Amino acid sequence: MPTPETSGLLAEQLLRLTRRLHRAQKRHMEPLGITPAQSRLLRTVSHSDQPPRMADLAQRLEVVPRAVTTLVDALEAHGSVRRVPDPSSRRVVRIELTDTGRATLRALREARRAAAEDILAPLSDQQRDALGDLLDTLSGTPGHRC
């Protein structure tokens, strides 16, 4: 049975690693002109079956609608998304990716991979496999690595 001290130490290690990964991702994303929050919105839009409404995005991202408006404004200025009218209701606005947005997502995926490689560089292939198995177990998605 793990001691509270061991669990506390593991929690601190996980938090430090998460912060380090976020810093590395931010560093790799900076040249793309996209913030982590904008990246998250782009990924959310890309995983939607149809262009989502602003309210749907706020709910999925767990932010207030005003925050989505700010993110969409910036991404629209970047050319990554566009607002489109909902065919069934003129009052509803949906957000869809542009070709630039799809290209940006590909670049963001590459930036995330590069950031992960920065963190994982000291590990051997065997250690990476073991870490992947442990992370799958902790996330509740065994065998679901991409």
Image: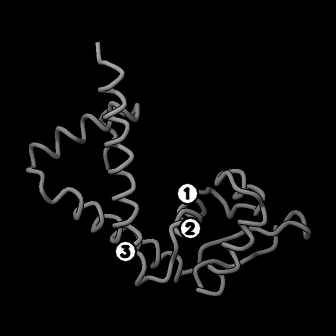
**Residue 95: percent from the left, percent from the top?**
70, 70
The residue where tag 1 is placed is 47
Q: Quadrant of residue 119?
A: bottom left
| Circle nearer the N terminus (1, 3) | 3
How many dots with numbers?
3
Mark 3 element type: helix
Residue at mark 2: 42
Instruction: State the CA–CA distance, disc 1 to disc 3.
Output: 24 Å
Instruction: Give the secondary structure at mark 2.
Output: helix
Task: Where is residue 45? Give x, y as percent.
Answer: 60, 63
Q: Which residue is mark 3?
A: 27
Q: Residue furthest top?
A: 1
Residue 59 to residue 8: above or below = below
- Height in image: 93 above or below 57? below
**Left or right of 59, for residue 104:** left
Q: Position of residue 21 (x, y in %)?
A: 35, 59
**Looking at the figure, which quarter contains the N terminus?**
top left
46 over 16 or under it: above or below: below
Q: For numbered disc 1, what is the local secondary structure?
A: loop
Q: Is residue 24 left or right of residue 77?
A: left
Mark 2 to mark 1: distance in Å?
9 Å
Q: How is the image coloured?
A: one colour
Could you give the CA–CA distance between mark 3 and mark 2, rounded to whole angstroms? 18 Å
Comparing 3 with 90, the one in front is 3
Name the amino acid type tagged 2.
Leu
Q: Residues within 10 Å of mark 2 (few under 14, many from 20)?
A: many
Badge 1 density bin: few <14, some 14–19, many ≥20, Cα 10 Å = few
